[in-house]
Image (cartoon, rainbow, N blue to C red):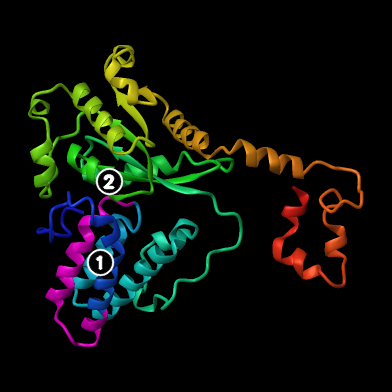
Amino acid sequence: MDQLHAHPAEPIDNLFSTPAARADRWRDLTAAATSWMHGQIDRACVEAAFDRVAVIEEFHAFPGAKLMAGLHDRIRAENATGTAAHTRRISNALLDRSYRATPGHWDLPADADAAPEVVPAQEPGRQLPYFEVLAVTSEPPSRWTALGTEMRRMRRPEDQFVYEPVFVGSFEDAICAAAINPAIIAVVVSEGFVLHSRHDAPILRQLMDPALETAPEEATALRLCHVLNRLRPELDLYLISDRHVEHLAGDPAANTVRRIFYAVEEPLELHLAILEGVHDKFQSPFFDNLRSYARRPVGTFHALPIARGKSVFKSEWIRDYGEFYGINLFLA
């Protein structure tokens, strides 16, 4: 998204106000686009509101580079109606999080002017828990879309979760993404990334260790893992190296890393490791055992829990009690 904005409205390391400000900035952009459509303001006001949104969205998977580029194209083409509809579509999807279960929200509509006033309800069916994975890479931004497609190809029907990648190319951007985006649960760090963001980050640069400027790649990668672990201890950290991974694995500085991968390892291994890490957090032994117990066949007695609630669900008088609480309460 290098071409989308040349002058961000504020530094990217304003880490304490930015998470709450994301929804506000989308509301501001939606209001500006609507006012532009009605001829109340000019395009420059919409451009300014877009710049404030775009710098934050680099650290989130949705709406992503394609939708943001499509929105910016409509602004530059003086398409006020299309801008308002496209902005409203993205803003609504973020508000109700329907993009997590509705794949169509990730595609650029052929006719943005026809975007609905309210995002359609989610499609029926079981929704997999959704999270995002931060990928810190030395690959150029022009390759990030292809890398994201590669990661999505690893998905399998039996996966218990679904995730989307967020790509950054610098130490500073990685810190900002982890601080700003709470949906990030895992981080994949590849060696060779640069230290400084292309955006302004004065606070981070004051705190940056000067020794990192001349540190080897593996030391910089481990230092980033250490900082991310201090910032968000719950993150699963994975390191990809093309060096002697056995030396890295034995380095005490690598204690914060969940697993180290050799660069040529099968991508499916990384995918499975990410899902395994999240599964370890997702487990709830008491609830899982309770759910298993509720599935067991038992003899029917008059005692209400053992009778599966039959005296409630078949009652002429307190059936609404069972409808309110549901069958699972009695199965457990």
- The x, y position of residue 308, in whole percent, is 83, 53
Residue projecting furthest to the front: 303
- Is 107 displayed left or right of 57 in the figure? right
Mark 2 is on which residue type?
Answer: Ala
- Is 115 displayed left or right of 244 in the figure? right
- The x, y position of residue 36, in whole percent, is 21, 82
Q: Up-down: is 325 above or below 157?
A: below
Residue 71 location, quadrant:
bottom left
Q: Up-down: is 209 above or below 164?
A: above
Q: Residue at x 14, y 69 (%)?
A: 48
- The x, y position of residue 43, in whole percent, is 15, 77
Residue 57 belongs to magenta span: yes
**SS category of the residue bearing label 2:** helix
Depth order, front residue of 180/88: 180
- What residue is pinned by disc 1? 25
Depth order, front residue of 200/153: 200
Depth order, front residue of 29/316: 316
- The x, y position of residue 255, in whole percent, is 33, 21
Quadrant (top left, top right, bottom left, bottom right) of the N terminus = bottom left
Q: Up-down: is 38 above or below 242?
A: below
Depth order, front residue of 165/200: 200
- What residue is pinned by disc 2? 179
**SS category of the residue bearing label 1:** helix
Q: Residue at x 18, y 52 (%)?
A: 14
Would you say the magenta stretch is mainly helix, strand or loop?
helix
The magenta segment is 34-60
- Tell me if label 2 and label 1 are in contact, CB under 8 Å: no
Q: Up-down: is 233 above or below 41?
A: above
